[in-house]
């Protein structure tokens, strides 16, 4: 009786439209729901976006591959990120280490990961961040690898040998995907999948509530604004002298600093004077704590400045996401704060600078092109009009957001399943 019922149920399932590819994959042994994945991610902790990559892709793995065993090979887990990872993903294994001059792992943990994991996944990033590590994995193990949710830059052509060997490459923006296709690579699976950070679900509501109460901000009665220099001064954050190239880039950043941020200040002034509501000037990257004060807050007229709160410390994504979730909207020169706000159903406008990577295209790719502005070709008034349109018809903005979210969820779900098919 039990056997007949099983056969009947299996036949009914097989008749469903969704069943054919799944049944075929199972019968061929391609899908391994208990696969062991080596995740190369966690590039740095001075940027909540880079932290968010790992938490986002772990959410995707937990949701769509709950039986998979994940080992994280991190670059950096400072600023409390290590504790947050352990709290959020108790089953996550860590394999710290580097690749030595002979192409071998430098730690027992990393060597064990090379031996036991089935596949290596290069997490979201601005380009192929660690080509040396991918080469070492492939040379030592011969096992598959791929890249998930990355942008590409023209310099990545130097890694064409890796691109050709990859089992899959998911670009987080279609501009990068177009560039990848122009290389005519031999990679069998090249598709679009949004940055893994879109899947982030990281909250510290108590910490955020305490902060908002302390600075006098109420739910839905403030916007968040995030500044950015045209080139991120990593040398400054590390406290070292800049190279000649870094000095040139810093001069370019200073040249455009006022021009870029005057447009955002115009939006802040309009928001405060027309709505009577408040503004939180906050960072995505550590150096932006001081930058926000210097370029966004201090130059404001006194009547507006009284309504603006300056976040005077850096934070990590759990508190940031909980604060963004309380905002009416967010406007950012950086890309990942809009993504984190998006994940909490908060409308976000991205102001793209021409020196940034191709990642800004993501906003258009997921259906939010009306909330994407190229700063060189945009006035403060245009940005302000869009913000006031969001504020004036909030249900319409949320409906637009929901449609984009539905698209993102589907693309990410499909892409994660295809990763396992490639093993």
Image: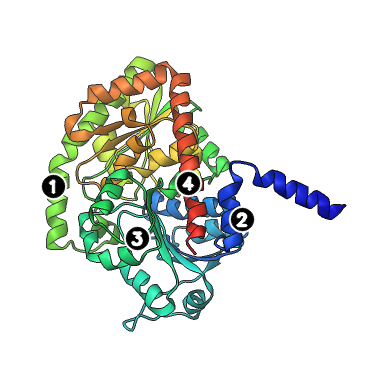
Binning the other alpha carbons within 10 Å of mark 1 as few (below 14), some (14 to 19) or many (20 upward) gives some
Front label number (1 vs 3): 3
Mark 4 = which residue?
412
In the image, which disc is placed on residue 252? 1
Q: Calculate the distance from the C-alpha at mark 4 to the C-alpha at mark 2.
A: 15 Å
> What element does badge 3 sit on?
loop
**Do residues under tags 2 and 1 come within 8 Å of each other at their CB atoms?**
no
Q: Earlier in the sequence, mark 2 or mark 3?
A: 2
Q: Calculate the distance from the C-alpha at mark 1 to the C-alpha at mark 3.
A: 37 Å
**Do residues under tags 2 and 3 come within 8 Å of each other at their CB atoms?**
no
Describe residue 123's horizontal placement relative to residue 58 as left or right: left
* Image height of 129 relative to 321, above or below: below
Q: Earlier in the sequence, mark 2 or mark 1?
A: 2
In the image, which disc is placed on residue 283? none
Front label number (4 vs 3): 3
In the rendered image, residue 196, in percent from the top left (x then y), is placed at 44, 49
Q: Calculate the distance from the C-alpha at mark 2 to the C-alpha at mark 3.
A: 27 Å
In the image, which disc is placed on residue 187? 3
């Amino acid at each position: 009786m039990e056997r007949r019922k099983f056969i009947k149920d299996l036949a009914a399932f097989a008749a469903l439209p969704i069943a054919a590819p799944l049944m075929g994959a199972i019968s061929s042994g391609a899908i391994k729901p208990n696969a062991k994945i080596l995740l190369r991610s966690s590039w740095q902790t001075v940027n909540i976006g880079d932290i968010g990559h790992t938490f986002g892709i772990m959410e995707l793995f937990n949701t769509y591959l709950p039986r998979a065993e994940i080992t994280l090979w991190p670059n950096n887990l400072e600023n409390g990120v290590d504790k947050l990872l352990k709290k959020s993903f108790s089953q996550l294994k860590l394999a710290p280490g580097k690749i030595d001059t002979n192409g071998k792992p430098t730690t027992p943990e990393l060597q064990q990961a090379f031996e036991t994991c089935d596949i290596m996944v290069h997490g979201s990033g601005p380009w192929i961040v660690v080509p040396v590590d991918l080469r070492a994995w492939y040379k030592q193990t011969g096992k598959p690898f791929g890249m998930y949710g990355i942008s590409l830059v023209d310099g990545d052509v130097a890694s064409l040998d890796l691109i050709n060997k990859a089992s899959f490459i998911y670009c987080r923006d279609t501009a990068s995907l177009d560039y990848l296709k122009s290389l005519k690579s031999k990679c069998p699976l090249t598709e679009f999948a949004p940055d893994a950070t879109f899947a982030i679900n990281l909250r510290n509501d108590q910490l955020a509530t305490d902060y908002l109460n302390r600075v006098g901000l109420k739910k839905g009665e403030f916007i968040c604004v995030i500044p950015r220099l045209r080139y991120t001064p990593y040398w400054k954050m590390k406290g070292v002298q800049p190279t000649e190239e870094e000095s040139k880039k810093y001069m370019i950043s200073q040249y455009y600093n006022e021009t870029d941020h005057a447009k955002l200040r115009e939006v802040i002034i309009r928001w405060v004077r027309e709505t009577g509501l408040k503004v939180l000037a906050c960072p995505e990257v550590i150096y932006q704590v001081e930058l926000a004060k210097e370029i966004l807050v201090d130059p404001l007229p006194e009547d507006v400045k009284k309504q603006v709160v300056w976040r005077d410390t850096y934070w990590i994504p759990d508190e940031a996401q909980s604060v963004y979730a309380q905002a009416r909207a967010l406007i950012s020169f950086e890309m990942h704060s809009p993504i984190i706000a998006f994940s909490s159903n908060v409308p976000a406008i991205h102001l793209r600078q021409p020196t940034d990577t191709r990642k800004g295209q993501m906003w258009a790719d997921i259906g939010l092109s009306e909330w994407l502005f190229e700063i060189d070709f945009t006035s403060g008034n245009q940005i302000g009009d869009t913000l006031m349109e969001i504020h004036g018809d909030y249900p319409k903005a949320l409906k637009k957001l929901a449609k984009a979210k539905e698209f993102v969820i589907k693309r990410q779900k499909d892409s994660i399943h295809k990763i396992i098919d490639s093993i």
